[in-house]
Image (spheres, rainbow, N blue to C red):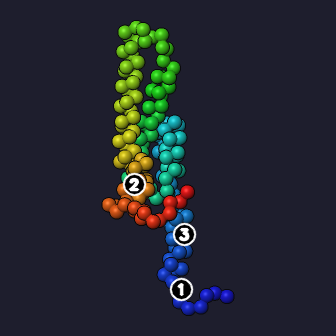
Amino acid sequence: MGARGRKSEAEVLAPALVASISSESRLVAPAHITDAERAVWSELVNDQPASAFSPTHIPLLEQYCRHIVQARLIADEIMNFDRAWLADDDGLKRYDKLLGMQEREGRAASSLATRLRITRQAVVHPEAAGRGGGKAKARKPWELVDA
């Protein structure tokens, strides 16, 4: 037997909200990106709420995935770099070039992550980040501190 009286607005809207959430689909990776880029794509898209990205985000997501994959390839090259080559000027130049490439890829990925709002700063609530909107919650001297 149901509850008596009129239904609240929340009771009326809840089934529609549940249906819209379950019908949301995540962006599918484009067919033309590589398997490594597709893995980064699915990791990123599945880590965010389904409504976080729309089709207008696809170009930025593609570029972000490319930069992450390239940064990983360069990092592998740096890790496997023969340290004996550092004694030679050509080896030092090559190592320096790899480090510069790694920095560029990191900067590009960071910039795109900021634009896509997937950085920690974009996700953390202001209160949790210590920026409580100007009003700090100070304890009164007579309040007990939780141990």
Is the residue under label 1 in contact with that under label 2 (CB below 8 Å)?
Answer: no
Q: In the figure, 86 relative to 139: above or below?
A: above
Q: Residue furthest top?
A: 88
Location of mark 2 (residue): 130
Q: Residue furthest left?
A: 134
Residue at the image position 59 percent from the left and 91 percent from the top: 4
Q: In the figure, 69 relative to 53: above or below?
A: above
Residue at the image position 35 percent from the left and 31 percent from the top: 104
Q: Residue 113, located in which quarter of the rendered image? A: top left
* Label whose residue precedes the other's in the sequence (1 or 3): 1
Location of mark 1 (residue): 7
User: Which amino acid type is shown beneath numbered disc 3?
Assistant: Val
Of badges 1 and 3, nearer the viewer stands 1
Residue 20: percent from left, percent from top? 51, 67
Q: Nearer the viewer, residue 24 or 4?
A: 4
Residue at the image position 39 percent from the left and 33 percent from the top: 105
Marks 2/1: CA distance?
40 Å
Residue at the image position 46 percent from the left and 22 percent from the top: 78
Q: Nearer the viewer, residue 112 or 60?
A: 112
Residue 67: percent from left, percent from top? 41, 36
Inspect this view and state whether residue 63 appears: no
**Dividing the image into 4 quarters, which one contains the C terminus?**
bottom right
User: Which amino acid type is shown beneath numbered disc 2?
Assistant: Gly
Marks 1/3: CA distance?
17 Å
Q: Nearer the viewer, residue 33 or 16?
A: 16
* Label whose residue precedes the other's in the sequence (2 or 1): 1
Q: Is residue 50 left or right of residue 105?
A: right
Location of mark 3 (residue): 18
